[in-house]
Image (cartoon, grey):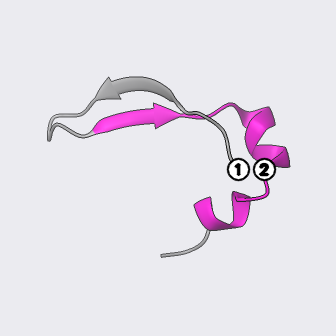
Amino acid sequence: MGCILEYVTTDREGYRQYKSKLEDCAICPLREVCFSKK
């Protein structure tokens, strides 16, 4: 499950950055995985 993230840009190190829609994250069952402390 989850949502498809929208590509935003590539940073100076070459990593691609993506963003999510706030309303998608609010109801996502995987939210705890994304926002857990690492």
Magenta stretch encompasses residue 30: yes
User: Residue 38, percent across and down?
Assistant: 47, 76
Residue extending farthest to the front is: 1
Identify the secondary structure beneath mark 2: loop
Identify the secondary structure beneath mark 1: loop
Label 1 vs label 2, nearer the camera: 1
Q: Residue at x 42, y 23 (%)?
A: 8
Q: How many marks?
A: 2
Residue extending farthest to the bottom is: 38
Q: Nearer the viewer, residue 9 or 29?
A: 29
Q: Earlier in the sequence, mark 1 or mark 2?
A: 1
Q: Are marks 1 and 2 in contact (CB under 8 Å)?
A: yes
The amino acid at mark 1 is Met
Q: Which residues are magenta?
A: 16-34
Marking on residue 28: 2
CA distance for labels 1 and 2: 8 Å
- Quarter location, residue 4: top right
Q: Residues within 10 Å of mark 2 (few under 14, many from 20)?
A: few
User: Residue 13, percent across and down?
Assistant: 14, 41
Q: Residues within 10 Å of mark 1 (few under 14, many from 20)?
A: few
Q: Nearer the viewer, residue 14 or 1?
A: 1
Magenta stretch encompasses residue 19: yes
Residue 9 shown left or right of residue 29 in the figure: left
Q: Residue at x 16, y 37 (%)?
A: 14
- Quarter location, residue 35: bottom right
Q: Residue at x 82, y 46 (%)?
A: 26
The amino acid at mark 2 is Cys
Q: Which residue is mark 1?
A: 1
The answer to whether 4 is drawn above or below residue 34 in the figure is: above
Residue 17 shown left or right of residue 14 in the figure: right
